[in-house]
Image (tube, coloured by chain):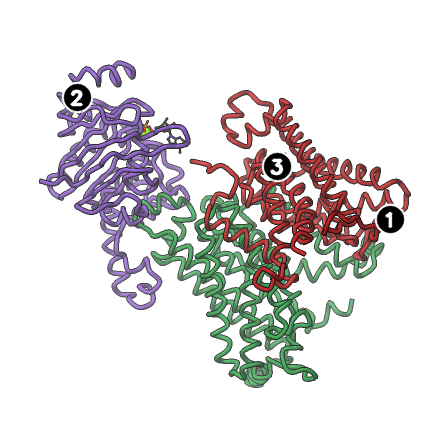
Chain colours: A red, B purple, C green
Amino acid sequence: MFLQLVANGLVTGSVYAIAAVGVSLVYGILRLVNFAYGDMMAFGALIAYGVDGPLHQSMIVAALAGMAATAALALALDVVLWKPLRARRAGFMSLFLASIGLALVLRQALLLAAGSQPRSYRVNPYRVFVLGSVRLSEQQLIAVAAAAATIVAVGLFLTLTTVGRVLRAMADDRALAAVAGIDVGRATRVAWLISGLLAGLAGVLAALVEYSFDPNFGFQLLLPVFAAVVLGGIGSAYGALAGGLALGVAQEVSTWSGFAGGVNPVYKPVVAFAVLAVALMIRPQGFFGQARVG
Amino acid sequence: MTPLLDVQDVVRTFGAVRAVDGASFAVEERSITGLIGPNGAGKSTLFATIAGSLKPDSGRIVFAGARIDGRAAYRVARAGVVRTYQAARVLTRMTVLDNLLLASTGHPGERLTGVLLRPRAASAHERRTLERAHEMLALVRLEAHTHEYAGTLSGGQRKLLDLARVLMLEPSLVLFDEPMAGVSPALRVELLEHILAVRRDRKITFLIVEHDLDFVMQAADRVVVMNEGRVIVVGTPEEARTNEEVVDAYLGKAH
Amino acid sequence: MSILSSGSFWAFVGVVAGIYTILALGLQVQFGFAGLLNFGQVAFMAIGAYTMAILVVKEGWSTWLAAPLAVVAAAAGGLFLGLFSLRLRADYFAIVTIAFSEIVRYVATNETSLTGGSQGTIALGPIGTASQYNGQWSRFEGRVQHAFGFSSSDATMLAIVWTVAVVLLALTWLAMRTPWGRVLRAIRDDEDAAASLGKNTFAYKLQALALGAALAGIAGLFYAWEFSFFSPDDFQPLLTFFAWMILLLGGLGRVWAVPVGATVFGFIFAGTRFLNFAPFTWFASDQRAYLRLIIVGLIILLLVLVRPQGLLGNKREMVLE
Ligand SMILES: Nc1ncnc2c1ncn2[C@@H]1O[C@H](COP(=O)(O)OP(=O)(O)O)[C@@H](O)[C@H]1O
Ligand SMILES: [Mg+2]
């Protein structure tokens, strides 16, 4: 039972981790806590649904389409919204509030276009794999595998490519990066591109894992994702990965009966916040991130 | 006689930078002590550490017989240690007058309970504060700007406002971080006179970081020289001026 | 179009605007004057409404005892949240406050024995009896209606809510003109500088948070009395965002901007019900509800982009940074 919970936690955590990296990357560059990220995830999941259902493409094609569309959306939003805000030197508050407005617009537009009824991809939720004492559905395995691949891909990107190193340098010290003659505009677009791809992927995976989803589901995922981001030290991509996985596992394991009888599963989201609260009390600057000075 | 302020082996780092690296010195009561050293020597960081806005990594800071290291900034200020900032931190979105009115301690009107339960005491205190504020404004020649937002002031005027605010608090120890930077020469002389008068009339001690060496030599009784986070010389202005280490570290490089 | 000329409809719009005025006034104290990015304001509204309803139905308290205690409970919620989170960076603080409001909602949804759960306050009493927490209030409202000769209970509620709102606005305005309010504004401007003037900035921020929470608690009481029952779904984060929109619309750091923002918001919200001309007629009526929220979102975006100090805000004192 305990191992099963850990496995389930890794599945949920994988989705959180992917999304958390997406949020953290953009924060590192723009200091934007993107409240619309959950709704971008829902957007990706719905696009994939359109490709998977009506168009009868394979799930992989559908997922890629969802990711591409979300990345395009992210880049378009940078042009029409975030760039003008940067131009007027908007600070954290303006950016955060704007992302709340954007979240409202996006989610309601999705509801308008797609309706509020739940949907599922054409996948078989009953195909189950048994690994020792742990049973995982095909979708859950896919989520974990995709997360692992993403971890490797993002890690390689950040360490091996020039743009990746630039992104990390900017997350560490934006002023310094600007002085060092870095093309901030290009780095920003790359950050949005990756963040959008990850949002689409996380949306599709979340929809697969949860089996049924509607346009509201992204918002429900948002706060645990934020918790993962903060846990990992906002702006740190690796921290976000670790934070997402840790949070997913903590949420599931908290329901284990061997743990003081177990927390009622309806309180899983609350567990995420409790972990966050404790973590922030111990380390107000986040768990894995560097203390920022000045 | 025990000193008013005793800084003992204070260390403060920022990541790998050892901004203050084991600084020790003492400031005597009612003295004017100059703290000099090249840029990056750690003077501003040391000020922040004494004032409580930064916590020291190690070391002790004793003020009037009590340890103040690690205390919250507002408690250090209330104990009578008030600092100014190198780039004056006036409240730019408040009027010049409001900036000064904030510089009062024990104001009953600044507590909700005081506002509700002791409205007379609060308004009496407010009247006194207002009078003092106008006096200070006259002193630093900012009367014409009384009702303007402090954000509209020039850099030099902000310094003056900061100065007025600090003097109004009547602290026992003032930490001035480059008070004369950006202040016109004519006003410098007056401010120097005022500082000397304040020291004479009230029991105020000054620790002053200042690049204007003429000012330091004129005003200071003692000079503390810092370099690379450490105190390298403590002595009279004359001793500091002629010390070889100082000439190397400071005068040699800065001029 | 008949509903447009219906007095009771407009009275309802006015009541809602009044309740939002009080809710957003709390945000004005917290953000407009103290610079605190509270995104969990709806939680304190919920605490106020639920505390009152539970005390009246389950404990049999008088409404006139339960209501003040509910406001105290909301303020205590603000103190609790503040003790935990006020030392955090602004961005973490914002996230933690939303999380707090969602925790409150989860607890209200799932602690059925305490709150009636997802069914709402109808299920507060024993099974089979629809519980009522606003009997005493209705009688009071009736007496006010009789005494002042109001034409309907809607008009009476409108008068009561706005009387309370105006009193609270006046008190807040006065509080901000005291030396206490001056310190609050100083903290908003530069917290470190305020601390080096000897101000205990943490204590002031805590007070601002708790007072704003108390105002939200009062808004919660009126919300409860206006609608004969309520459920945890009424306290979605969306409500907090509405309050933020009102704050931005009216203007930051100006007490009297709040009712202006709330009234404009009320008209936008009510007015968009009447978008029954093309292209809006292409949408079914439930879809028009989505459109309405899109408009709210667009207004937030527009304000942040074009007029960050709000319609009546004083740009030199407070802008959204
Ligand atoms: N907030 C900070 N973060 C990182 N480094 C800092 C910070 N403040 C000061 N430093 C570093 O500490 C050293 C001392 O700086 P400072 O105290 O400002 O010197 P001074 O006032 O003598 O010119 C410098 O190397 C400076 O770059
Ligand atoms: Mg300095």
Closer to viewer: mark 2 or mark 1: 1
- Whether the residue carrying mark 2 lies under 8 Å from ligand 1 is answered with no
Q: How crowded is mark 3: few (under 14 residues within 10 Å), some or many (20 or more)?
A: many
Q: The N terminus of chain A lies in which quarter of the figure?
A: bottom right
Q: In this view, does C270 lie above or below C187?
A: below
Q: What element carries label 2?
A: helix
Between the residue at mark 2 and the residue at mark 3, the CA separation in whole angstroms equals 52 Å
Q: Is A11 or C44 nearer to us in this picture?
A: A11
Q: Is C190 or A160 nearer to us in this picture?
A: A160
Disc 1 residue type?
A: Arg
- Whether the residue carrying mark 1 lies under 8 Å from ligand 1 is answered with no
Q: How crowded is mark 1: few (under 14 residues within 10 Å), some or many (20 or more)?
A: some
Disc 2 residue type?
A: Ala
Same chain under badges 1 and 3? The reply is yes
Q: What element carries label 1?
A: loop
Where residue A26 is drawn, which disc sits there?
Answer: 3
Q: The C terminus of chain A lies in which quarter of the figure?
A: top left
**Left or right side of A190 for B218:** left
Disc 3 residue type?
A: Val
- Whether the residue carrying mark 3 lies under 8 Å from ligand 1 is answered with no
Q: Is residue A261 above or below residue C228?
A: above
Can residue C264 be seen here?
no
Q: Is A191 or C143 nearer to us in this picture?
A: A191
Q: Where is residue A20 in the image (x, y as percent from the top left)?
A: 63, 42
- Disc 1 target residue: A122
Q: In which quarter of the image is ligand 1?
A: top left
Closer to viewer: mark 1 or mark 3: 1
Where residue B240 is drawn, which disc sits there?
Answer: 2
